[in-house]
Image: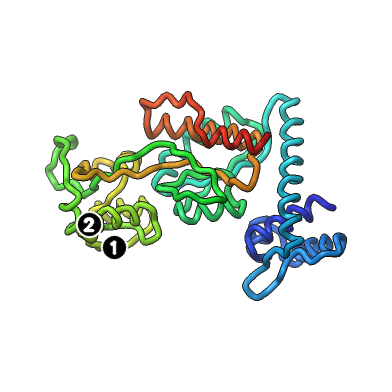
Amino acid sequence: MDLKQLEYFVRVAELGSFTRAAQALDVAQPALSRQVRLLEVELRQNLLVRNGRGANPTEAGNLLLAHARGILHQVERAREELGRVRGALAGRVAIGLPPSLSRVLAVPLMRAFRQKLPQASVSICEGLSVNMQEWLATGRLDIAVLYNAQPAAELDVSPLLEEDLVLVQARPAGLPQDPPPGTVSLSEIAPLPLVIPSRPNAIRMQVEAALAHIGLRPTVALEIDGVAAILDLVADGAGAALLSRNAVSSSIRPSAFQVRAIVDPPLRTRLSLAVSAQRPATLTQQATLDLLRRTALAVLKPDATGEDHSALERAASRRSA
């Protein structure tokens, strides 16, 4: 069996579509289909059921999928071991970050990655947590930082840290640059016009759930996805926003906003690191996972030491053994 054919088959099976697989692999769809068909001819088995909605593995296809993932992982491990002989880990790692964190984490993470893993390559993409969970399961991402991640059989998820959400409003004219810190109760937020992401954004869902718990609903002025756009609209007077302090401090004009802590009760979001439970982690991915965790703690929670390995990293080590 040809390794390229196995890689093509795995990607089609995971994404459920020849079209999506061709886009992910950056190959022409006819060439992709031909290679998968040649694999079926060689094995004398139909591996995929093709229909108008995509392609799904047959019983034989599911059996090969499990083997093919292991084969491709072992090939990648062999390359990494050879790279270690040269003195460096190699390979490619795809990382997913929420838009609210990407601006804060991307630069220090890339700087640390180039320093610690100079022979490896990394790609970073932004996405909603609900989308990134799907991308982890289908192999588009290797690692992701998720907001309020829900347990899933196909993922290994471990807590990273918690962030407080704050009320962000335009700074009134004449207000000092550093006004005394203020607070606002959750019930006081309900009538305020909010500039907020659309569903199923994790923060949007959390705000709605927290207000529903006290019998209230948010007043949505505008729905827009993207932290930069939300802050621009808040600065323009379109409404208020509920974001993390890091999202505001890393904006282009943090002085344009006043920030108030939310109390009674506070709003806290859980940040987690997630990897696929179906696909063993390579050595490069494990090293990147550790690097991402340490960088995130250093940037988002400077008082954390980041010395203890998380349960997620131990799980990744077990899977790679």
Quarter occupied by residue 122:
top right
Rendered residue at 78%/62% (across/down): 36
Which label is found at residue 222?
A: 1
Q: Position of residue 289 (x, y in %)?
A: 55, 35
In this rendering, position of residue 31 left or right of residue 270: right
Q: Position of residue 226 (x, y in %)?
A: 38, 54
Which label is found at residue 239?
A: 2
Q: Nearer the viewer, residue 286 or 150?
A: 150
Rendered residue at 36%/39% (across/down): 162
The kind of secondary structure element at disc 2 is: loop
In this rendering, position of residue 227 left or right of residue 289: left
Q: Residues within 10 Å of mark 1 (few under 14, many from 20)?
A: some
Pointers 2 and 1 in contact (C-beta within 8 Å)? yes
Quarter occupied by residue 81:
top right
* Label 2 vs 1, first from the N-terminus: 1
Residue type at tag 2: Gly
Can residue 210 be seen from the camera position used here? yes
Q: Position of residue 110 (x, y in %)?
A: 53, 36
